[in-house]
């Protein structure tokens, strides 16, 4: 078939469901069409060398500049504690701390953090001593399947630091106080970027209150 010829595919919903979309299209698409797509994409970008301070250790990496921080952690450094839930900023499973501030690592490029410090769930404990949030999550059963948990704990660590600096939230009622009381409503609002499919929210809130030193 000529490369410029119009390509016609008759892919019905039924055939897709029966055979699997990817397998069907990959075996049906003419090579010319795939080659044309790949030529449009151009050559891959030049790799970039960066240095990250991760959990107190220096790591030198040479990466495709399009690599997200999450993929750099998981695929290049085998730090798989940070989870890929949605890969586009909706679930919070990939939350890590950059210079102490929480961030969705799937939404940021590793090269943007050259020279910065990154803390992942693997870096929160000190030796055999769990971080107070980790202890509280265990004591309050703050998880079921656990897939969201590393993101919840990193996010909570960043959130507690934010609240100690006096940062208000959308639901803070008294902005004259130096620090908002971490009520259930405050915690739920401040943690609203972290989704738990198992709906362990009451236990997560209780764990965070314990770690914050608030009455549970
Ligand atoms: Fe990053 Fe869901 S994986 S927000
Ligand atoms: Fe399963 Fe939160 S514990 S998603």
Image (spheres, rainbow, N blue to C red):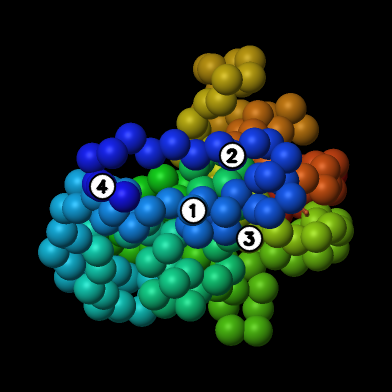
Q: CA distance from mark 2 to mark 3?
A: 41 Å
Q: Which circle, 3 or 4, is nearer the viewer? A: 4
Q: Which residue is mark 1?
A: 28
Q: Are the residues flagged by discs 2 and 3 in contact, CB closer than 8 Å?
A: no
Which is nearer the eye, 5 or 185?
5
Q: Which residue is mark 4?
A: 2
Answer above or below: position of 25 versus 70: above
Q: Which residue is mark 3?
A: 150
Answer above or below: position of 173 versus 119: above
From the viewer's perspective, is 191 left or right of 22?
right
Task: Identify which residue is drawn at 68% across, 45% down.
Answer: 15
Q: Are the residues flagged by discs 1 and 2 in contact, CB closer than 8 Å?
A: yes
Task: Identify which residue is drawn at 49% across, 39% down.
Answer: 9
Task: Identify which residue is drawn at 49% across, 53% down.
Answer: 28
- Residue 148 location (% of width, % of height): 68, 54
- Residue 35 location (% of width, % of height): 27, 56
Q: CA distance from mark 1 to mark 3?
A: 41 Å
From the viewer's perspective, is 79 left or right of 201?
left
């Amino acid at each position: 078939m000529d490369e410029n010829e119009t390509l016609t595919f008759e892919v019905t919903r039924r055939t897709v469901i029966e055979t699997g979309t990817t397998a069907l299209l990959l075996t049906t698409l003419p090579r010319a069409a795939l080659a044309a797509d790949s030529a449009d994409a151009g050559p891959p970008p030049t790799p970039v060398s960066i240095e990250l301070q991760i959990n107190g250790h220096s790591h030198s990496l040479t990466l495709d500049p399009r690599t997200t921080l999450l993929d750099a952690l998981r695929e290049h450094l085998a730090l798989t504690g940070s989870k890929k839930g949605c890969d586009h900023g909706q679930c919070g499973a990939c939350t890590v701390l950059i210079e102490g501030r929480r961030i969705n690592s799937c939404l940021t490029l590793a090269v943007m953090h050259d020279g910065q410090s990154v803390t992942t769930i693997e870096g929160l404990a000190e030796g055999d001593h769990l971080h107070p949030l980790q202890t509280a999550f265990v004591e309050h059963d703050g998880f079921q399947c656990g897939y969201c948990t590393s993101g919840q704990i990193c996010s909570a660590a960043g959130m507690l630091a934010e609240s100690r600096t006096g940062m208000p939230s959308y639901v803070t009622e008294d902005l004259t106080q130096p620090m908002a009381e971490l009520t259930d409503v405050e915690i739920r609002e401040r943690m609203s970027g972290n989704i738990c499919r198992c709906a362990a929210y009451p236990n997560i809130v209780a764990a965070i209150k314990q770690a914050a030193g608030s009455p549970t």
